[in-house]
């Protein structure tokens, strides 16, 4: 695989760039029309459970979602790879996973706890919270683990279309972020990073601690390394909680989530934006894993809603994938 020198990255990653100089979106650089809203509807957490796999597949095959990423330490990864074998053009990346956050269902590092002792709790599972990883995690061990997850994905017969970060752990410290970017540039795999105008991500609560000039500096580094870059990133959908009054009513849950996604798309600025969702065909069994069952099912139902799909057509929204972004990037001199 092509290697990239990191001397340039370490030199410029946190230099300031005037926001006024950022006059062209990455969407335009990649050949999309000026002022176009280009969107990736991205499903996180494939491989976590059977229900997550089913929700991911339904949202992409029958809905508006067009990309996903897989949690390689989890038990239902082989099931999702069975689907990939039959659908090899699926836009699927690695959901780099460094936390195991549920109480009754846990997972351990792909590289093994003995190889990465700072990444595991006293029981040998990945730490349950991001703050635990930041407190205990050694960046070199972290790099070994995320590399092992990518290598496992490739060993299972597929090239990941992109990399991203489960629960945002790799954005939680400068040292972790460097390892994340390093892995993507070394393997020449696109990484989820909002390096353009970053309008939405800067407004969201608990968003990146980097300011827009720093985000743009890192975005330029990724672009110069031959990788595509997002203009913006929407991570807020997990906060759209389901009102108890509509729990169990799929029609009302679908209507609520559809309106939230429509509202989001209308508010986006032009450029390439990834919108993160957690589409799961939730069951009573999944409720034993996570209290987010209705929220996640709502994401799946919204993606499958004909009203939402027609809205995207009527608004002239361009849907893209990480695979397409990388192909377009290769054509840019």
Image (spheres, grey):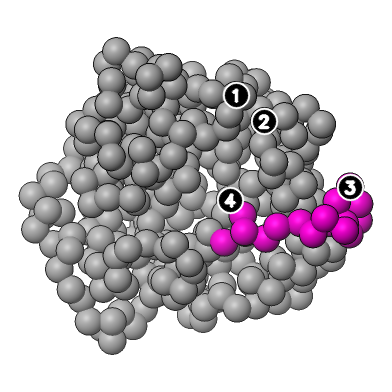
From the top left corner, tell me how far across and down residue 229 is, in percent: 37, 59
Helix, strand or loop under label 1: loop
Residue at 47% over, 38% down: 95
Tag 2 residue: 289
Q: Count residues near mark 2 (Cα–Cα under 10 Å), then give few for <14, some for 14-19, many for 20+.
A: some
Instruction: Of the two numbered discs 2 and 1 on the same chain, state the one appearing first in sequence.
Output: 1
Q: Count residues near mark 1 (Cα–Cα under 10 Å), then give few for <14, some for 14-19, many for 20+.
A: some
Badges 3 and 1: C-beta atoms under 8 Å apart? no
Badges 2 and 1: C-beta atoms under 8 Å apart? yes
Question: Was residue 131 drawn as part of the magenta stretch in this picture?
Answer: no
Tag 4 residue: 42
Q: Quadrant of the N terminus?
A: top left
| Residue closest to the eye, 166 or 324 | 166
Badges 2 and 3: C-beta atoms under 8 Å apart? no
Spatial CA distance of label 2 from label 1 is 6 Å
Span shown in magenta: 236-253
Residue at 46% over, 34% down: 128
Tag 3 residue: 248
Helix, strand or loop under label 2: loop
């Amino acid at each position: 695989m092509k290697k990239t020198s990191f001397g340039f990255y370490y030199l410029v990653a946190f230099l300031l760039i005037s926001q006024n100089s950022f006059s062209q979106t990455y969407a335009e650089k990649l050949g999309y029309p000026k002022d176009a809203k280009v969107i990736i509807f991205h499903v996180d957490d494939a491989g976590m459970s059977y229900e997550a796999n089913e929700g991911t597949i339904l949202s992409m095959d029958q809905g508006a979602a067009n990309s996903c990423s897989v949690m390689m330490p989890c038990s239902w990864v082989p099931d999702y790879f069975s689907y990939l074998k039959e659908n090899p053009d699926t836009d699927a990346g690695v959901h780099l996973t460094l936390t195991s956050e549920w109480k009754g269902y846990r997972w351990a590092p792909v590289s093994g706890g003995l190889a990465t002792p700072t990444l595991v709790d006293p029981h040998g599972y990945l730490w349950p919270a991001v703050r635990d990883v930041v407190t205990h995690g050694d960046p070199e061990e972290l790099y070994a683990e995320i590399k092992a997850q990518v290598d496992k994905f490739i060993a299972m017969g597929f090239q990941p279309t992109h990399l991203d970060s489960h629960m945002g752990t790799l954005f939680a410290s400068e040292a972790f972020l460097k390892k994340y970017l390093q892995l993507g540039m070394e393997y020449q795999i696109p990484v989820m990073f909002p390096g353009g105008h970053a309008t939405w991500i800067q407004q969201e609560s608990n968003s990146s601690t980097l300011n827009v000039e720093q985000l743009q500096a890192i975005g330029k580094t990724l672009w110069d390394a031959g990788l595509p870059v997002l203009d913006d990133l929407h991570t807020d959908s997990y906060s759209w909680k389901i009102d108890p009054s509509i729990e169990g009513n799929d029609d009302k849950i679908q209507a609520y989530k559809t309106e939230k996604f429509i509202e989001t798309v209308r508010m986006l600025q032009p450029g390439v934006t990834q919108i993160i969702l957690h589409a799961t065909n939730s069951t009573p069994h999944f409720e034993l894993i996570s209290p987010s069952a209705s929220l996640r099912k709502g994401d799946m139902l919204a993606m499958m809603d004909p009203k939402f799909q027609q809205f995207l057509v009527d608004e002239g929204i361009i849907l893209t994938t990480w695979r397409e972004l990388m192909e377009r990037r290769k054509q840019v001199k």
